[in-house]
Image (cartoon, rainbow, N blue to C red):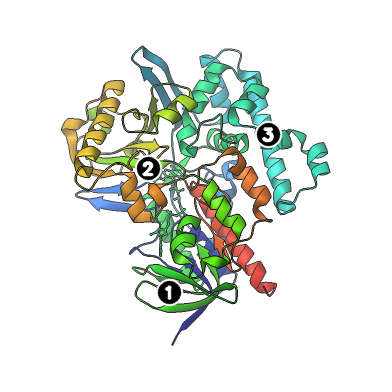
Amino acid sequence: MVKKYDLVVVGAGNGGLMAACRASLMGLKTLVIEKHNLPGGCATSFRRGRFEFEATLHEVSDFGEGPARGLLGHLFDELGIEVEWLPIPDAFRVIVESEKGRELDATVPHGRDKFIAYMESQCPGCTPALNRFFEACSEIDEGLEYLGLCRGKPDPEVLRTRYSNFARLCGASVMEAWKAIEMPQRCIDILSAYWPYQGGDLYTLDAVRYFKMLDSYLSNGAYLPKMRSHEISVAIEKRARQFGCDFWYNREVAKIITHKGRISGVVTADGEVVRTSHVISNVFPHVVYSKLIDDPSLIPEYELKKANARTFGGRGFTILMGLDKSPEELGIKDYNVFISISPDSATMYRRCFSRETNNNLAATCLNIVNPNASPEGTTHFGITCLFTDEGWGDVTPENYTAIKREYALNLIKRYEDTMGIRIRDSIEELVIATPITFARYLGSPQGAIYGYFSDRWDGMIARTFSESMEQTIPGLKFVGSHGVRLSGYLPTYTSGDLAAKQVMGEIAGGR
Ligand SMILES: Cc1cc2nc3c(=O)[nH]c(=O)nc-3n(C[C@H](O)[C@H](O)[C@H](O)COP(=O)(O)OP(=O)(O)OC[C@H]3O[C@@H](n4cnc5c(N)ncnc54)[C@H](O)[C@@H]3O)c2cc1C
């Protein structure tokens, strides 16, 4: 007998899981279909030898206590999702080192007061500019709250009069906003370190999103789950099941089917048909429109134009290592170090186009946050680097292994030379994931890990403003890194939550 659900969620990444959890809580009969054998997508871990490797998560904000508990923390509390969080000691260390030598080496602490005091020591006289930055962040929060209340359809007059600074920031790039705030260059250099988290240079990225991210990390701290990001995925899945959600693993959705101009079901790769009036896709629109939808003539022209106008966001490259010495023996003291050749995000962004020039990296040592992250006397160590173009498009099956090893070795050497720490002799386990790995595992085009590039016309604010006006095929919604909220743990979870509520609204409203 053909199975029927109110909602089918395609993919159990962060967006899909949260959508399923919220939808089930609201009483929608929900099914999640995931092609792998476990939930999480990017938010996962895996074992090699004696090590359990964190696949992606470097840090997430919002899970402090009291005022440091942000939007995501409250969402988890409301849904009863239980995860044990560990605080990360410092925000980050940033090192800029070129052939000319070391230009910058700063270790930025969490906590607004500590942060301001530290920045003052690095750049005397910068406190008024930093205060202006935090004021702008408060105005962003108020403006976003207003946008939420008016469901993305703001009254221009209210925006102009009550939220004028927010309105101005909505149209500004990060660099334009720094300029307006008169942020000293040395502070800009330090605070540019996070640009790889959003995968775009700060001359292009929208100020609202970057400022919000900076503010939540610097003011409220950053966290990691004790048992890797897999713990989060399992906790959300458990809650969704308690609310009545069904999960099918090892099943891939091969087609999304339509009837009379709207969604009517899905078909799995092994031929099972599931009837539903609503599909939430954790899979990219590019893939849905080109491969999954049975009747492409239903895709609104506007949606196709938008998909064609977009480029893909950052593609991932990671090296995960299990080292047979402790961090103390190796001399590793930092959890998170960004190493680059220039403090200028536009220069770095361009260098990330190809393997020849890209040696910009973030190195993380999990044991600094969680001393039990690996067996005693060992270290869980990772290097991540971002590609901002199709920098692996030229690789063939024949040269792939040699190229990825050579590239990984170059990054390891770059870390060793910059830090004066030798790790090569201590490698017990080593796993390399290239954009090709991410493309295969996640099904994301070109191995994009950050959805679509967050261009000026397509940033968080632009997507929020246009969301209510944009329609795809009736009954279909998208969640995840390619969605309205863009990429990262927080945005993908909140996009899932929002989409489930929208589906509930449509079902309750009879659409
Ligand atoms: C190396 C790395 C480091 C990162 N670090 C951070 C960080 O520190 N902080 C942060 O906030 N973010 C970080 N991110 C980004 C964050 O991990 C992602 O933005 C987020 O996890 C993406 O979630 P998603 O909802 O888009 O789903 P995805 O993780 O993309 O999952 C999609 C799911 O859909 C499934 N699927 C695909 N096609 C089908 C199909 N046809 N049928 C069934 N299932 C299908 C896939 O198997 C997968 O499980 C990092 C990402 C990477 C790769």
Q: Nearer the viewer, residue 401 or 309?
A: 309
Q: First in sequence: mark 1 or mark 2?
A: 1
Q: First in sequence: mark 3 or mark 2?
A: 3
Q: Which residue is mark 1?
A: 267
Mark 1 surroundings within 10 Å by alpha-carbon count, few (fewer than 14), some (14 through 19), many (20 or more):
some
Q: Quadrant of the C terminus?
A: bottom right
Q: Are marks 3 and 2 in contact (CB under 8 Å)?
A: no
Say which quarter of the image contains residue 123: top right
Q: In this rendering, is residue 178 above or below 60? A: above
Residue type indicated by callout 3: Leu
Does residue 135 appear to the left or right of 11 in the view shown? right
Q: Residue at x 44, y 57 (%)?
A: 13
Residue type indicated by callout 1: Val
Q: Secondary structure at mark 2?
A: strand
State how far apart marks 3 and 1 are (Cα): 44 Å
Q: Residue at x 49, y 38 (%)?
A: 198
Q: Which mark is residue 169?
A: 3
Q: Secondary structure at mark 1?
A: strand
Q: Nearer the viewer, residue 50 or 467?
A: 467
Mark 2 CB near ligand 1 (8 Å cut): yes
Q: Secondary structure at mark 3?
A: helix
Q: Which residue is mark 2?
A: 316
Q: Residue at x 34, y 41 (%)?
A: 317
